[in-house]
């Protein structure tokens, strides 16, 4: 009797273990794919605040101009400037540079103020002997800009400047007002290419400005023509 009872208890225990092992597996097998939570540590949502997302596929974010920095910017330009008429008969084309601080009032309207200067060798028969002079000044631009894509834009505007020549060489050639602070005026334009970076853009610019103080004894309007490349940093 005791031997039979022990066998019955052993069979009952084995049956209970089998039931406990089968039913959890069946319950897990009945779960839908939606109920299985992906606990992978590499799962990550797209970050819309970055422009240079190297860890996500290209379609994860669309770059547009609203993602760039806007407002105050610094602009540095290097190139050349020559003169047509007036002082142009006595000087060669020289190196031209300008530094400006701008503000983007609207996406399509900018104002820029800064300083500029150029270095020119004289081109006239002696005396006096050939030498060089500097033309330095300040300027204010009012620009209209059209943004055709997230990277490419074009701009143009008016320019008002204040300039004077350093040294007395131009006075010797008959330009009596060259050393005075004198107004100049004209226009400027350019093309702008914004990098895939919220702060930087690179561009080409060119313009022309009339210099009434650089009209010599022979008359003729003195027009300064400049062009070059610029780098812009938007804070």
Image (cartoon, rainbow, N blue to C red):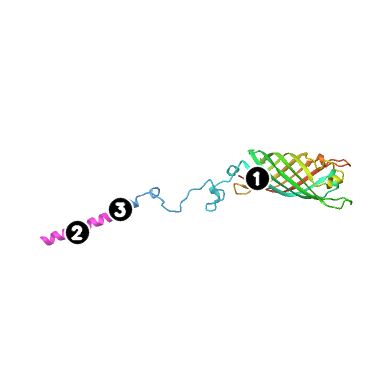
| Image spot of residue 196 (x, y percent) | 60, 49
Q: Of label 3 and label 2, which has the lower sequence position?
A: 2
Which residue occupies the foreground of this view, 231 or 39? 231
Residue 181 to residue 1: above or below: above
Q: Does the stretch in magenta take in 76?
A: no
Classify mark 1: residues with Cα within 10 Å, few (<14), some (14-19) or many (20+).
Answer: some
117 relative to 217 in the view: left or right: left
Q: Looking at the rendering, in which quadrant would you find the C terminus?
A: top right
Residue 74 marker: 1
Which residue occupies the foreground of this view, 126 or 65? 126
18 relative to 6 in the view: left or right: right
Q: Of label 1 and label 3, which has the lower sequence position?
A: 3
Residue 11 marker: 2
Q: Main secondary structure of the magenta part?
A: helix
Whether residue 85 is visible here, answered yes or no, is: no
Does dot 1 land on a helix, a strand or a loop?
strand
Q: Which residues are magenta?
A: 1-21
Q: Quadrant of residue 85?
A: top right
């Amino acid at each position: 009797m005791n031997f039979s009872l022990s066998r019955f208890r052993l069979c009952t225990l084995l049956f209970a273990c089998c039931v406990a092992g089968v039913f959890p597996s069946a319950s897990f097998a009945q779960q839908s794919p939606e109920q299985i939570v992906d606990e992978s540590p590499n799962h990550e949502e797209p970050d819309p605040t970055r422009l240079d997302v190297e860890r996500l596929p290209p379609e994860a974010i669309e770059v547009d101009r609203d993602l760039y920095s806007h407002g105050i910017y610094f602009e540095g330009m290097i190139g050349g400037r020559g003169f047509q008429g007036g002082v142009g008969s006595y000087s060669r084309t020289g190196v031209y540079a300008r530094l400006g601080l701008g503000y983007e009032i609207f996406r399509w309207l900018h104002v820029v103020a800064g300083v500029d200067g150029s270095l020119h060798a004289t081109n006239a028969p002696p005396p006096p002997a050939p030498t060089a002079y500097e033309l330095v000044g300040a300027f204010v631009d009012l620009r209209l800009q059209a943004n055709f894509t997230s990277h490419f834009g074009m701009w143009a505007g008016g320019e008002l400047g204040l300039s004077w020549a350093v040294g007395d060489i131009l006075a010797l050639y008959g330009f009596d007002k060259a050393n005075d602070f004198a107004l100049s005026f004209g226009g400027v334009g350019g093309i702008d290419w914004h990098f895939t970076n919220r702060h930087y853009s690179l561009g080409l610019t060119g313009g022309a400005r009339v210099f009434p103080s650089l009209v010599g004894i022979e008359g003729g309007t003195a027009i300064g023509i400049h062009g070059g490349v610029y780098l812009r940093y938007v804070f």
